[in-house]
Image: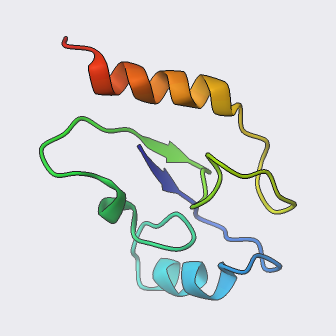
Amino acid sequence: MAGRVDDVPLPSKHAVLGSWLNSEGIANDGMVPTWSSVLPGNRHVVVDGLGHTGSVLDHLFAKPTDRIALTKAVLVLAFDTQ
């Protein structure tokens, strides 16, 4: 699973890095390039709007995330043999 954030909120501590990556045309999660979150050769999904810490932390600058549903979806991707 990888995240992608097009607009990093300015009060976010990741704003400078995320904005710079966006200005360079590099898809990112607000901190690292999206492609760097994907293990080569494995199935993956990119979740639009999911920031670097969005799947594990609640904080003022992230949209609410249903972490239980997200964890279940990632486990299905990891262990489903279809």
Left/right placement of residue 8 relative to residue 4 reads right
Point out residue 58 in the picture as x, y percentages from the top left corner: 79, 51
Left/right placement of residue 33 relative to residue 12 reads left
Quadrant containing the C terminus in the rendered view: top left
How many labels sit on residues? 0
Q: 22 or 53, which lies in front?
A: 53
Quadrant containing the N terminus in the rendered view: top left
Q: Is residue 79 above or below residue 30?
A: above
* Residue sitting at x 61%, y 58%: 51
Point out residue 74 in the picture as x, y percentages from the top left corner: 43, 30
Point out residue 40 in the picture as x, y percentages from the top left corner: 15, 51
Rendered image quadrant of residue 78 = top left
Left/right placement of residue 63 relative to residue 81 reads right
* Residue sitting at x 76%, y 71%: 9
Point out residue 77 in the picture as x, y percentages from the top left corner: 34, 25
Q: How is the image coloured?
A: rainbow
Q: Residue at the far left: name it.
A: 41
Q: Residue at the far top: name it.
A: 82
* Residue sitting at x 60%, y 50%: 50
* Residue sitting at x 72%, y 38%: 65
Q: Is residue 8 above or below residue 35?
A: below
